[in-house]
Image: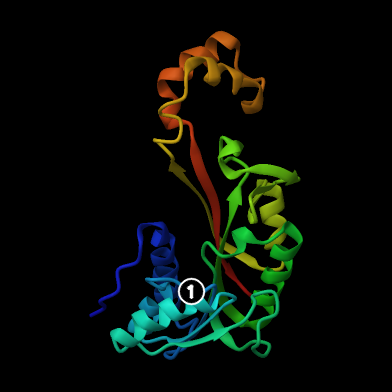
Amino acid sequence: MTDTILQLNAVPIYGFLSSIAARQSQGELGDRIRVLDCGAGGAVPPLALFSEHGFDAYGIDVSDRQLERARQYCEGRGIQVDLRTADMRQIPHDDGSFDCVYEHYAMCHLSKLQTAVAIGEMHRVTRSGGLCFLGVISMDSWPKSLYGTERGPGEYWVGEDRHCMFTDAEADELVSAWEVLSKEKRVIYLRDALEDISEEAWMDMRDRRGSDCSEAGWRDRYSQRANMANYTHVYYILRKQ
C-alpha cells in the first residue's frame, strides 16, 4: 500500500510507473530496480512513490531548498531515498548505473543546447535495455506571451526564469539516440488566462496566432477563447538500445 499521491501536474509519472511494471512483468527488468529522478526536489517528490513501490530510489536537484523539502516529506513518512545536490547536465553516477531514469518539469528551464546535454547524460547513466521518461514544452502552447519575452528561438523569459519550447521535429531529434516506446502530446487548457481579455485585444492577437484564420473567423472565436489558451507538453517513454 502506498501513501503518496502526486500533485496534479505529475499525472504523467503514473503512466511511466505503469510502463515499468508492464516491462517488469514481461521479464525485461529485474526484480530490484534502481531509478534516478533528475530534478527530485519539491514538497511532494515523485521519487517517494517509486520508493514506496520497492524501487531503489535516487534523486538529484540543483536546488538545496527544494531537496530539503523532499527530504522532509520522505523522512516524515519513513520513505527511503538517496538525494544529493547535483546538475542533470553532469550527473554524478557511472555509466549504466540505473534501470530507469526520468525527469518531470525540470528540463523546461534549460536552454535548448543544455536540454540536449541533459538528455545525453540521462542516456549515459541508463543501462542497456533500461527505460527513461522525459518531456519538453511544445511550440503548440499558446499564447506565447504567457511565457514571457522571446530572447532566442523558442526560448521565453520572465525575469530570470526561462521556458524553452520545441517543435515536434526538434523534440524527436532530442531523443534520437533512444528507442521511442511511446510519445504523447498532453494539452492543459488555461481557461482563466484569457477570461478578461477584451474583444479588441483579442483581435490584436490574430497575427500572433497565425494567418490561417480570417478576421471574421477570428472574431467568431472570441466566445471560445477559454478553450484556446493552453500549455502543451510532448512526453516520451524511451528505451536505451
The quarter of the picture where residue 69 lies is bottom left
Please give left or right for residue 76 compared with residue 42 in the image. Answer: left
For badge 1, the amino acid type reads Gln
The quarter of the picture where residue 193 lies is top left
Q: Picture coordinates of residue 233 (x, y %)?
A: 54, 51
Q: Picture coordinates of residue 146 (x, y %)?
A: 55, 40
Above or below 136: residue 238: below
Above or below 108: residue 190: above
Above or below 114: residue 84: below
The quarter of the picture where residue 10 lies is bottom left
Residue in the foreground of this view, choosing between 60 and 34: 60
Residue occupying image coordinates x 48% and y 74%? 66
Please give left or right for residue 84 compared with residue 176 in the image. Answer: left
Residue occupying image coordinates x 42% and y 31%? 227
Q: Is residue 123 visible in the rendered structure shown here?
A: yes
Q: Is residue 53 visible in the rendered structure shown here?
A: no
Find disc 1 in the rendering and name its residue: 66
Q: Could you say whether the residue bearing mark 1 is in a helix, strand or loop?
A: helix
Q: Picture coordinates of residue 126 (x, y %)?
A: 62, 81
Residue in the foreground of this view, choosing between 111 and 213: 111
Residue occupying image coordinates x 43% and y 60%? 12
Q: Picture coordinates of residue 105 (x, y %)?
A: 52, 61
Q: Quadrant of the C terminus?
A: bottom right
Total tally of numbered discs in the picture: 1
Please give left or right for residue 200 compared with residue 120 in the image. Answer: left
